[in-house]
Image (cartoon, rainbow, N blue to C red):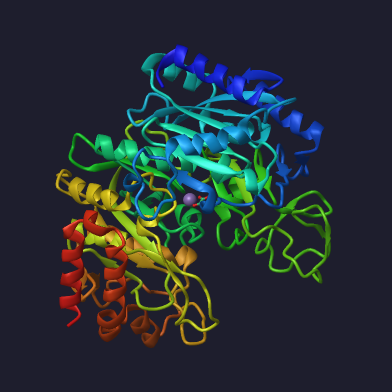
Amino acid sequence: MTGHSDLQRFIAESEKLCEPANTVVCDGSDAEYERLIQTQLDNGSLLALNQKTHPHCYLHRSNPNDVARIEKLTFICSAKQEDAGPTNQWLAPDEAKRRAREFFSGSMRGRTMYVVPYLMGAAGSPFAKAGVEITDSPYVAASMRIMTRMGNVARDHIAQHGDFTPGLHSTADVNPERRLILHFPDEDLIWSVGSGYGGNALLGKKCHALRLASVHARNEGWLAEHMLILGLESPAGETTYIAAAFPSACGKTNLAMLVPPAEYKGWKIWTVGDDIAWLRIGSDGRLWAVNPEAGFFGVAPGTSERTNPNALASIRANTIFTNVAVTPGGEPWWEGLTEKPPEKLTDWQGRAWTPASMDRAAHPNSRFTAPARQCPSISPRWQDPQGVPIGAILFGGRRASVEPLCYEALSWNHGVFLGATLGSETTAAAAGKTGILRRDPMAMLPFCGYNMADYFRHWVELGTKIPKPPKIFRVDWFHKDEQGKYVWPGFSQNIRVLQWIVEQVQGQRNASESPLGLVPSPGALNLDGLKLSKAQLEELFFVDRAHWRSAEVPMTREFFDRFGAKMPAELYAELEALNKRMA
Ligand code: OXD
Ligand code: MN
């Protein structure tokens, strides 16, 4: 939609359909945020946490039927089914609207309808895109204030530039039978009904900045990716920026906020973003990236002083927690925060909890929503309107064996192949070797707004247009030994792999050929101070050629075949080349 009159029409049509008691157009001010919080404190949908230890922090308990993204009810509603592709769920636009209209109809009766203008990207950035989310949830409106540049700044942008992406959201009766998350790429429109969960309801994030933005990106020659962005500064003061895609819940936030271990004196990681990257070719021929978000919507469980001290520091104030447990002193708690749980807690559903309780105290997908500016490692360039130049792209998988710790692609197309074949294994068995592999190309499986075969083609074609492309790497921190124990220490020690990657980007040729790609030459990976045996190191880089030929290559071919004739020949060629190298 374009400009003021379209916005007025969008508001009027939403009012007619949803019948709210009143309408509030959000300005993004502090006073308005306070009002949004107060409304929820008054109606009991927010609880104040301990304001001494956690000033301006609150807890929201969601409906227990509404705790995660719901892929089964998420649809790409392109005019033609083939434009959604075999990995997306598709509904014809008219049919999708007919179904959703019934759920939206009268859904805001007695409620306030919030009109939330927002910007993805910093104001004034050539990357920035505007959206307007209409919602009946003050929790969503307040969360959008944290996660995006919300209010007048976005209205001004729309007044100046015209275009915005409209999104209509209603929690309606939070009924999984009456829940739909719909994307209309041809109209550039989002409809989400029946859920208040972040990934379904904060429409700026997955719906706009990934699913619809990926369609814009294809049409306009850029990339909208499920990637963190970090800068690694060396003791010499040189910073190299890395964008990295990992499937959900594989530690993107931890990597983006990594605190170097004691052995890495003088090194520093700067956080630019933890979930989404928009990348464009700059006038200097390099690929430049921005984080379009303004906050973190992170998974709480597992976050601790040991795993991510920067995240903990980011969520000490001005944070909305969802579905975490609470201590008797009113502080948030989740599994992994402390080594031993407190003797008494209130669990995520408000029930009394003790260590003897069978259930987990916090929901496994409990979350924090916190302003990015509060992160101690936030990059001084995180709001740079031009973004940061990307030296390396990482694709991270999660497999118990098969994949080495790290390797470099032999070419751009080989890098695209490494992204397209990414996957994570469910931890099915105790010992390391088994698990169900869920393919998650570029970690975009749930987030690509169009046919993924066309998406792969877009990546291949972009490679021919970037004069100075980043190098592409594959990493996997999740190797397990026969006993099911992780071989690589992970977390802050991942900086050792990042160091090798940055050195490769800077032109040090410290790599040797393997059938998979370029692996660190003996001694090139800095392992000083790590307790890693020679056998473990060998295990981390072992390539079972017979297994690759007999299992991985055919499995990959089967996966590619799912996309039919649209699958780029370049990726089949990479598969054949891989097969040959495994001989
Ligand atoms: C997220 C996800 O919430 O990837 O970031 O699911
Ligand atoms: Mn994500």
Left or right, 118 with reference to 198: left
Q: For residue 320, what is the image quadrant?
A: top right
Left or right, 231 with reference to 13: left
25 or 270, nearer to the observer: 25
- Measured from the top left, where is residue 47 in percent x and y? 78, 41
Residue 504 shows in the view: yes
Residue 377 shows in the view: no
- Measured from the top left, where is residue 270 in percent x and y? 42, 48
Q: For residue 335, what is the image quadrant?
A: bottom right
Which residue is pictured at 37% across the width and 74% down the height?
A: 527
* Residue farthest along the top direction in this orientation: 5
Left or right, 365 with reference to 381: right
Which residue is pictured at 73% across the width and 47% down the height?
A: 61
Which residue is pictured at 24% across the width and 47% down the height?
A: 458
Number of disc labels: 0
Which residue is pictured at 53% across the width and 45% down the height?
A: 376
458 or 291, nearer to the observer: 458
Quadrant location of the N terminus in the rendered image: top left
- Measured from the top left, where is residue 442 in percent x and y? 35, 56
- Measured from the top left, where is residue 20 in percent x and y? 68, 22
Q: Where is 93 relative to 447, above or below?
A: above
Left or right, 66 with reference to 465: right
Q: Where is 582 relative to 354, above or below?
A: below
Quadrant location of the C terminus in the rendered image: bottom left
